[in-house]
Image (cartoon, grey):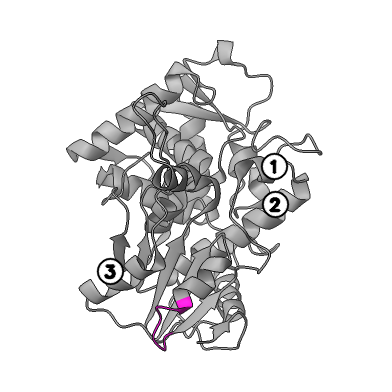
Amino acid sequence: MKVHSIIRSKVRNLLWPNYLDKAEFEKYLDWNRQQQLGLLFTLTARGFFSEISCLMNAMIYCLIHDMRLIVDTSRFLYSGSSRQAVDLDELFTLPLGAALKQEAFSGDDADLYSNGTRSDDFWTINHEIQKYHASGQRFSTVVFGENRSIFELKSLIAQKLFVRRFDNDDYCFRAARTNALTQIGLETTSRFACFHIRRGDKTAAFIEEQEQPSSNESPPKHIDGEAISPKVYFEKLVDAEYEPDEIFVMTDEYRLIEETASFAKGTNLKTLAQESKTGYWQKDFGKLTTQEKITELKQLLLEVQIAAEADVFVAGYRSNVARFVHLWSKPGQMRISVDRQANWNAL
């Protein structure tokens, strides 16, 4: 079994997804500026995709309720030795952070103020969006058209506004996407699947509970994600009657590449994971310098882009990363959950 990190390959010529051009982006910003009521949304130091997901929910909430969105990025992933926030606009093509920022605007000026998970308005927004998603309610908005579900709205926002920034050419998306797929060495004209396998802080409590069952007196553990064996991922492919030529393994723990290979039965594995990776921990990420964080996030976004290109994506939907891949994924992609959260949700 060979694990190929970088080889040359052919790539799809299809331009997907279509991004908003500057005129459409300005249309959204013009609409946003015209609204009288205001929602101030603060990005915090929680997990990257958790924050991005909640920001998109705030955008949808404002579109539905005709509210102006103002984003405070001054504490976005703010921690570590640099004591500086990560610039959102270094990661995505469209300058959302700068465009939605308003100087000298405080929580006292806002009609709603979402200031992290300890603020009531944060939960008001996210619970309402999830309620609309669960009920199947549909909405018409100025920017994204008529009769859209919450998933459709969030997917359009993810694909059109959160376009990954590859280089200094803001709209060189076709070339950037081609370069990314060439770098990873996937034969994307062939059949390929993606496995997203998390460990680290996402599954630590789950693993601890399995190894040491808690007594009745022990406080209940918060299980954020489940540590699923790679064997289950292959079983899901068999159930789906899908035989890939290649599998891209997206993981934060390199040891899992070797474990996955033991079940692969001749299928080529591809990965960007480095041998030094032993699981992602938010507390360790917080200790990095600002530039180190940006480098790590660009790598993560590259992996998410590749995962979105797969014919089949197998992952646990308790992961914010997996749910974002679903939003970015190409039309017709088969998506399979391996954990107890069987379906996508809006949180």
**Secondary structure type for disc 1:** loop
Q: Quadrant of residue 63?
A: top left
Q: Distance from label 3 to label 2 (Cα)?
A: 34 Å
Residue occupying the point 49% across, 37% down: 55
Q: Which of marks 3 and 2 is in front?
A: 3
Instruction: Give the secondary structure at mark 2.
Output: helix
Contact, mark 1 vs mark 3 (Cβ under 8 Å): no
- In x, y percent, where is residue 16? 43, 69
User: Of the residues under marks 1 and 3, which one precedes in the sequence?
Assistant: 1
Part of the protein shown in magenta: 261-267
Percent x, y for residue 37?
45, 19
Question: Are dots 1 and 2 in contact, CB under 8 Å?
Answer: yes
Q: Please name the residue that numbered disc 2 is placed on.
A: 294
Q: Earlier in the sequence, mark 1 or mark 2?
A: 1
Horizontal side of residue 171 vs 69, given as left or right = right
Question: Is-magenta flag for residue 263?
Answer: yes
Q: Which of marks 3 and 2 is nearer the N terminus?
A: 3
Of the residues shown, which amino acid type is indicated by label 1? Val
Mark 3 and 2 residues: CB-CB less than 8 Å, in contact?
no
Q: Can residue 323 be seen in this view?
A: yes
Q: For mark 1, does the 10 Å Cα neighbourhood hold few (<14), some (14 to 19), or many (20 or more) residues? A: many
Disc number placed over residue 86 in the picture, else none: 1
User: Which residue is at the front of the view, 242 or 183?
Assistant: 242
Q: Is residue 94 left or right of residue 309?
A: right
**Spot occupied by residue 112 in the image (x, y as percentages of width and height):** 46, 18
What residue occupies the far top of the structure in this picture? 108
**Residue denoted by label 3:** 236
Q: How far apart are marks 1 and 2 (CA)?
A: 7 Å
Front residue of 65 and 334: 334
